[in-house]
Amino acid sequence: MTSSRLGMIALATVFGLTLFTVVDGALAKSGQADPGYQPKAGSSHAVTTFYADVMPILQENCVDCHQPQGLKPGGMVAPMSFMTYEETRRWAPAIARSVMEGRMPPWFAAPEHRGTFRDERYLEEDEKAVLAAWAEDGAPAGDPADAPPMPAFSFAAHDGWSIGEPDLVITFPEPFLVEDDVVDLYVDIPLELTADQLSEPRWVKARETRPGSPAVHHILGAFAGLAPGSTPTIYEEGYSTLLHPGPRTIEFQMHYNKKPGAGTAVYDQSSSGVVFYEPGDTIRHVVQSDWLPIMRFLIPAGDPNYSASMVHTFEEDMQILSFSPHMHLRGKAAKYEITYPDGETEVLLHVPKYDFNWQHGFRFKEPVLAPKGSELELTLWWDNSADNPSNPDPTRDVRFGRPTTDEMGFGFMSMTPVEPREIIVGEPIPEDILGTQSAVTDTSDPASRR
Ligand code: HEC
């Protein structure tokens, strides 16, 4: 189809009595059958149109990423916008395929966890069927009057910050040039947090790290990191971590990844924004980041299903808030399983198909209670065979290492003591918290501490 031909799409009711022709959004009644869309012979379903049927599904499930100012989970940038009919229609077949094959919307927890995590993304079977029918019908527009109102996206209103206007923004001193020949580059970029920017410790209410260019694969460490490259964190009322004041150096551990070649160089200036609690607010739960490390392993060349595990024992009653498994290109699956003191076990998170491209933080809707003595077992699986399309070299035995061509094995987690505190923001910070919080506020990537 040529593009002018694509601009002409006819809409018919099943009975073929009323025919409308949509020419670039303008609706004109036409007495003649249009050469464009024709319902298939014998088709019994009412015509599925963009404005009436597809747009509501896209708005609900896709457009928070698929728009120019969209969310960039883990630095992943959605390559196309689905805001308007004009932008979306040529993607109709790809949309149908991506949802039928389960790639979109991106979500990696096993289906039995449905309802457990915040921000989970699922399409109902009937919603998938609507998208498939629309593509099959030739992606008709329908009547713009049927369009639902476009929801207000908070990030567009705040210069791209989904957490709202930050109280503090930390960014590279100057843009970093990712050169033409770069494919995969790990670089630590030091930023100065000055005393002018932050003169005393403050309690973090929300934070977000934003990649400054599409070449950012992910940002591993940033300050107050919970999980690398995860989506913005907005703490529940009363939950917080402490951000220590300047002057000090904060490292952004950048991972750039792009296609190499002349003219592919880009400048990147990534940044982190923080919103703080206000004086007088009460902090009841000081959130700690931790990681379960699996670092001693040797994955044999060609092994399709190598696994390793480790166990963490809780020494006081804790609430578990989130998990984020981290492996590299050979990462295959991850599981966190808890054994309570009474012997009962529960799989808290199973990621059956881990994908390195999506560094996802799984945040529980309701914190999980881990009584003192509970044991949390992390198990990770790797696929070092040639059947793993991401595998950079199936002929190599692989150990722990920082480059993506080596492997990692971390189960990041965030948690907080069950016993609540009562810390008033603006009053002196208790000694025990000042002491224990430093590790949390520096960097979350233990691999850099070699
Ligand atoms: C959390 C953000 C996010 C959401 C939500 C999301 N996408 Fe995507 N989408 C992406 C990103 C990022 C890519 C690029 C993936 C890549 O490069 O591997 C992408 C790629 C795609 C592609 C092209 C590649 C492919 O796999 O076919 C299609 C089609 C697509 N998305 C459709 C959808 C549809 C339909 C929805 C809603 C049902 C949706 N997406 C929801 C982020 C998102």
Image (spheres, helix red, strand yellow):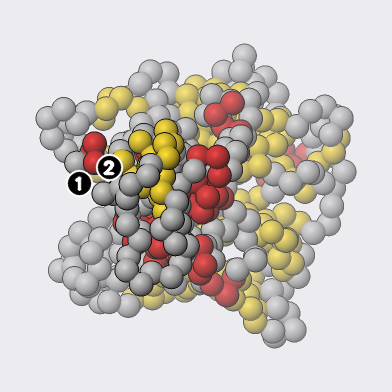
Where is residue 115 drawn, in percent x and y? 65, 66
Sequence-first tag of 2 and 1: 1
Foreground pick, 71 / 268: 71
Q: Residue at horizontal 35%, vertical 61%?
A: 39
Asked whether mark 2 and ligand 1 are closer than 8 Å, the reply comes as no
Tell which residue pokes out farthest to the front in this image.
31
Foreground pick, 85 / 22: 22
Q: What element carries label 1?
A: loop
**Amino acid marked by disc 2:** Leu
- Image quadrant in which you'd find residue 413: bottom right
Where is residue 280 drawn, in percent x and y? 87, 30
Q: Residue at horizontal 69%, vertical 84%?
A: 344
In the rendered image of this protein, does residue 280 appear above or below residue 36? above
Count of picture labels: 2
Is 110 on the left-hand or right-hand side of 319? left
- Image quadrant in which you'd find residue 419: bottom right
Q: Residue at horizontal 54%, vertical 58%?
A: 121
* Residues at discs 2 and 1 in contact (Cβ within 8 Å): yes
Q: Name the residue under label 1.
A: 1
Which disc, if any, is residue 6?
Answer: 2
Q: How crowded is mark 1: few (under 14 residues within 10 Å), some or many (20 or more)?
A: few
Where is residue 107 drawn, in percent x and y? 48, 60
**Amino acid marked by disc 1:** Met
Q: Residue at horizontal 66%, vertical 50%?
A: 288
> Disc 2 to disc 1, how far (Cα)?
6 Å
